[in-house]
């Protein structure tokens, strides 16, 4: 009987100690990213099809639950993912062009988060993505009659990606729940999003590309935001 009482007392004490370390974070954030869609069939075209720099944004909110320094997080983000290209066609008469694919996207990252002793943290997880609209635009010496073009039918509606990042939740006043969120995050897509090449051709067209290659999204950038922290008194 005494052993049972002692065991129950230890379990209750352990539970109270764990609960005392629980904290919640509600976040509002926005990011600005360098974005790419890479495909080996585009990479193999030489000067005719080259990658160029593209920039896109995301914004949304997140919720994190921490038990001590270990936590889990979920976010809802909206924005865009772009891919830019440039190239030169012809040898005697050269035609220069630049083109852009603009995807309207939404994202739900599921993250494992690890806090540092102070403000910093590390995060990694999987992200579920959806594409609601895809537009292709070309400019320069080559102009298509239907420009910009709706190319949504060429792209996958959903894809999965891995995300990894690091940042800091800076709280200037320890007892005040609001903090400033800053950090960086990288994304790499697992799934083939299909799509079009730099000239707007369907990458799944076997008459143009005899060997199909996957199109993978890549992005990396900085984000900022505000965080509201709810915690036990000893964590404030």
Image (cartoon, helix red, strand yellow):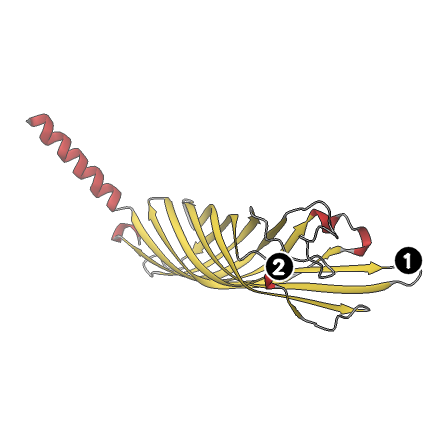
**Which of marks 2 and 1 precedes in the sequence?**
1
- The foreground one among 101 and 158 is 158
Q: Where is residue 100 in the image (x, y as percent from the top left)?
A: 68, 64
Position in image of residue 228 (x %, y %): 36, 61
For residue 154, the mark is 2
In percent of the image, x 31 and y 54: which residue is there?
Answer: 236
- 192 above or below 13? below
- Name the spot of residue 75 as percent of width and height, x first: 42, 57
Residue 69: x and y, percent? 37, 44
In this rendering, position of residue 52 left or right of residue 89: left
Find disc 1 in the rendering and name its residue: 91
Q: Nearer the viewer, mark 1 or mark 2?
A: 2
Element carrying mark 2: helix
* Label 1 secondary element: loop
Give the quadrant of residue 84. Answer: bottom right
**Residue 183 seen in the figure:** yes
| Left or right of residue 81: residue 140 | right
- Residue nearer the viewer, 13 or 218: 218
> Residue, x 41% and y 48% (percent of image)?
118
Vertical arrangement, residue 117 with respect to residue 177, above or below = above
């Amino acid at each position: 009987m005494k052993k049972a009482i002692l065991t129950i007392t230890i379990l209750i004490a352990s539970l109270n100690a764990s609960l005392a370390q629980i904290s919640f974070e509600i976040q509002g954030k926005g990011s600005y990213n360098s974005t790419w869609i890479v495909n080996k069939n585009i990479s193999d075209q030489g000067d005719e099809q080259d990658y160029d720099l593209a920039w896109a944004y995301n914004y949304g909110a997140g919720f994190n639950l921490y038990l001590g320094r270990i936590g889990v997080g979920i976010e809802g983000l909206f924005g865009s993912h772009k891919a830019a290209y440039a190239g030169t066609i012809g040898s005697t008469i050269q035609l220069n062009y630049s083109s852009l694919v603009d995807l309207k996207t939404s994202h739900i990252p599921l993250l494992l988060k690890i806090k540092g002793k102070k403000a910093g943290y590390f995060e990694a997880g999987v992200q579920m993505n959806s594409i609601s609209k895809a537009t292709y635009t070309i400019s320069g010496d080559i102009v298509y009659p239907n420009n910009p073009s709706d190319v949504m039918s060429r792209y996958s509606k959903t894809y999965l990606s891995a995300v990894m990042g690091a940042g800091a939740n800076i709280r200037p006043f320890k007892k005040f729940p609001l903090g400033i969120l800053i950090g960086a995050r990288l994304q790499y897509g697992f799934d083939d999003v299909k799509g079009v090449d730099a000239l707007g051709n369907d990458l799944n067209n076997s008459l143009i590309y005899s060997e199909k290659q996957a199109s993978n999204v890549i992005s990396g950038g900085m984000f900022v935001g505000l965080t509201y922290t709810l915690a036990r008194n000893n964590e404030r």
